[in-house]
Image: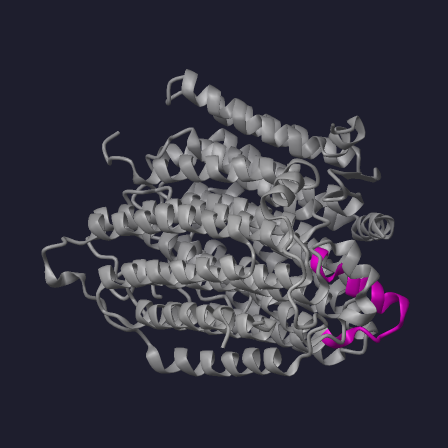
Amino acid sequence: MIPVQDLFASAPLLIIGGSILIALILEMVFDSQSSIVAWFSGSALLFTAYWSLYHLYDRGFAFNNMISISGRTQLLFFIVNFAAAVVVMFSMDYIKKIQTNYGEFYILLLSAVLGMMLIAAARDMVIVFIGLEQMSICFYVLAGFRRKNIKSNESAIKYFLLGSFATGFIVYGMALLYGASQTFSIPEYLAHVETLKSNPIFLLGSLLFVIGFTFKIAAVPFHMWVPDVYQGAPTNVTAFMSTAGKVSGFAALITFLSPFIDYSARTTGSAKFFMPFLATLSVLSMLYGAIVALSQSDVKRMLAYSSIAHAGYMLIGLSALSYEGVDGVLFYLVAYTLMNLGAFGIISILETQDEKMLKIEDFAGLSSRSPLLAAFLAVFLFALAGLPPFAGFFGKYFVFVSAVENGMTWLAIVGVISSVISVYFYLRIIVLMYFSKGENTEVVSVPKSALLGVFVVFIMFVIMSAFPQKFEGIIHTIGLLTY
Amino acid sequence: MIPLPYYLLISAFMFIMGVIGVLTRKNAIIVFMSIELMLNAANLSFVAFSSFLGNIYGQLFVFFVMAVAAAEAAVGLAIIISIFRNKATVNLDEINLLKW
Amino acid sequence: MDLYLILFYFFAIITLVSAFFVVTTRNVIYAAFNLMLTLFGVAGFYVLLGADFIAIVQLIVYVGGILILLIFGVMLTNKITDTDIKSGFLNRVPGLLIVGTFAGILIGTLLKSTWRIAAPLPPPVAGLVGIGNLLMTEYTLIFEILGAVLLIALIGAASIARKQSN
């Protein structure tokens, strides 16, 4: 018998799980041209996002401690649900434009969200694994959703093969973790962290597990798929993968590392064995992403490399293995999600049916074709570049500060260098949009729902940029509640 | 009696062969088979640990991995078929519209 | 030499040799058949380890399900009569280099570490009963989610592999 508190604590999961089934029935009953499934899934996602925000300070455990609901979980629930709801708004016209207007799209989106929420709530490695697979399987299909388009097929197969490869590493890593600790439960790891941290099998297992997850967060050494998949997948799917997918990858890493973060906070600085490893991944991702992005000519591909660099910045916060670092990562994740959603959303509006408007030079003179979209895009790109006064800057600031406080000033310096490099390729687009004339002068037709999506993201983003300290305070408070 | 490290070594060898297969082969189906080898290697480790530790959770996890592998296989084959319809190849170096 | 050890070496040879052929053979169908042998070998290990339920599931799901699906994939994507079914190798040197380092670390750690568990096998855990009980109590949630994973795999596979016409 499942207690009622369990059901209440896991309400967001149940709402989304139920919505999948209802959406399936709706898709079956109504004809495929009606957008009822889209409206239904959009409102279910928005409702869940609202629910999580409303219960931000609640705590609870459910299903025999398999799932724990805490402030951090609720915040992650909010991010993924919000991102998915915005992606639904972008998709309503986009999937008609690319002639794949099928209700399954929204069902797969909802299922991916279910997987992400499981990862965010997990207190047990088995839940992390199942949630990850639920999410990945949906992503494999979504990446290839434009199934008559060879680029989309290609991105799906690359994503699938490399994703399963990463799953292999994760499962093998978990086998070693299990052999060393005899358990899958994260509270158990927390209880035995003293003995586990010197067990070579456990460390090897952890390394394999973390390497597997660098795939999901799009960091070096499992970054090979990122540019191809982000470029080839439908733009709305890319918007979703690059934001919510990355959020849940980091959620899994934070969940898995939380015993060590806690341990290193209790006993100052004696659990730093993950630090060199995570710091290396971080440096490689930042520099690789920023430098390779310079030479790109396709916007989606450029943003893909930029997302590799952003994963690097966020890894700085994790490699500090401190509470402040994790708070910084969470702040950065929210900011990054909003910026990237906005940028990809605008690209999905501009993209034409025959895949024009995806080259960087196509953005020349955009400010005269659609002043509103150009202005929004400029804001999001400024923010991605990490320039003040936008939230992207504060995200970097919090992460760098946590690195400096933990005696890794060099890591922060590499981060600053890489940010300086990356300013160039973001500003290049802005300069093109405002200071050069394009050949194409026709006015862009903007679908209302997608514009609403961009607008919602923009408002959230402005609020976050205006009150970064307050926001950081909230994240800090709910972070303390988690332990 | 057979000691635990024997099983672990067999499993490690299988895993490494799987990794070699993924990195060196170019037929998508063979790459997928190599991934199945990796998953089987992990499963073997799980069952070995489970029975030497007298702890059932490892066997249970193997059960989950198998279910997930079946789901992945279904989706993977669907993707391979959809790409074959458009391009008539499953060789990864011929699938090169996007740079690999 | 006791029977267990003989069986162990027998399964070890089957598994490793056929796994090697899966990775190296140029013919996709041969690879599939070698994969079948590997899966049988692993099932044999499961039996030796006292996990008979898992061994049977291995045969049903892997050999009966996944492998058949793979062979279907081979048949549908290659014309079986053509010699085109061969497949070659891709960037061999860097791949092997990375794997070599990785293998060294992995096997080194496995050999060096000491295992707390002593030699004799503890009484075999009651496989089927234990798994069944856990699935219905502690792991209910995961059992349900597995249903969702399989459902979504079904929907997803059908939605990308269906006919091209609208």
Q: Is residue C1 above or below residue C76?
A: below
Q: Please name whichever residue, B93 or B8, is drawn nearer the observer in this view of the structure.
A: B8
Residue A215, horizontal then vertical, whole percent: 53, 61
Taking the magenta stretch, the answer to whether it contains residue A204 is no
Q: How is the image coloured?
A: one colour
Q: Position of residue C78 (x, y in %)?
A: 18, 54
> Is residue A388 at least partly visible in the picture?
no
Q: Residue A205: in sight, yes or no? A: yes
Residue name at image x 57 percent, y 26 percent: A19
Residue at the outermost top position: A29
User: Residue at left 46%, top 80%?
Assistant: C98
Q: How many marks?
A: 0
Hey, which quadrant is residue A195 in on the image?
bottom right
Please give the name of the residue rendered at 14% of the width and 53% of the height, measured from the top-left corner. Answer: C79
The secondary structure that most of the magenta stretch takes on is: helix
Q: Is residue A258 magenta?
A: yes
Give the magenta range: A255-273
Determine the image quadrant of residue A299: bottom left
Quarter occupied by the N terminus of chain A: top right
| In the foreground, A153 or A132 | A132
Question: In the visual, does C12 lie left or right of A430?
Answer: left
Percent from the top left, x then y, of residue C69?
A: 32, 47
Q: Residue at x 68, y 70 (%)?
A: A202
> As drawn, is A296 to the left or to the right of A18?
left
| Nearer to me, C138 or A275 | C138
Q: Is residue A258 left or right of residue A42?
A: right
Relative height, residue A38 to residue A327 (above, below): above
Residue B89, placed above or below residue C22:
above
